[in-house]
Image (cartoon, grey):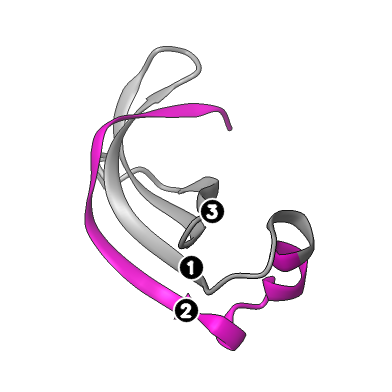
Amino acid sequence: MDFQIIGSIRDVETIAAGRRIRDLPRLRRAYGKARWRKMKGRATVKLRDGTVRQAEVHWYEAHGIGRRELKLKLPFLDEVR
């Protein structure tokens, strides 16, 4: 799913760090050895079709490398249940 983050990410939390990240060997091969963290937060996103939604976003980040592999978690936060 292609998307663009509009504004800033709010309510940022660390989900896992260091050896608790399942994909740690892959992250190190792809982006380099660093202190990796898996993070989550809430953001306003613009989808490929132009729709603007509230969503939970997950990503990996490391100092000196930055955010990598942003993913949207469904369902969207603004959906009525």
Select label 3 or label 1 by which is in front: 3
Q: Mark 2: which secondary structure?
A: strand
Q: What crowding class fits label 3: few (fewer than 14 Cα within 10 Å), some (14-19), or many (20 or more)?
A: some
Can you say which quadrant of the picture contains the N terminus? top right
Q: Mark 3: which secondary structure?
A: loop
Mark 3 or mark 2, earlier in chain? 2
Q: Amino acid at mark 2?
A: Ala
Q: Residue at x 72, y 67 (%)?
A: 28
Q: Which residue is mark 2?
A: 16
Depicted 76 relative to depicted 65: above or below = above
Q: What crowding class fits label 2: few (fewer than 14 Cα within 10 Å), some (14-19), or many (20 or more)?
A: some
Left or right: residue 21 compared with residue 52: right
In this view, the residue farthest toward the top is 50
Q: Residue at x 53, y 74 (%)?
A: 35
Q: Which residues are magenta?
A: 1-28
Q: x, y (%) of residue 20?
A: 57, 86
Left or right: residue 43 compared with residue 75: left
Mark 3 or mark 1, earlier in chain? 1
Residue 13, by quadrant, is bottom left
Q: x, y (%) of residue 57?
A: 40, 50
Query: Disc 3 to disc 2, how far (Cα)?
Result: 17 Å
Question: Quick one: 68 or 52, which is closer to the camera?
Answer: 68
| Magenta highlight on residue 19 | yes
Q: Residue at x 46, y 62 (%)?
A: 63
| Magenta highlight on residue 23 | yes
Question: Quick one: 8 or 52, which is closer to the camera?
Answer: 8
Left or right: residue 28 compared with residue 77: right
Query: Disc 3 to disc 1, how far (Cα)?
Result: 13 Å
**Label drawn at residue 65:** 3
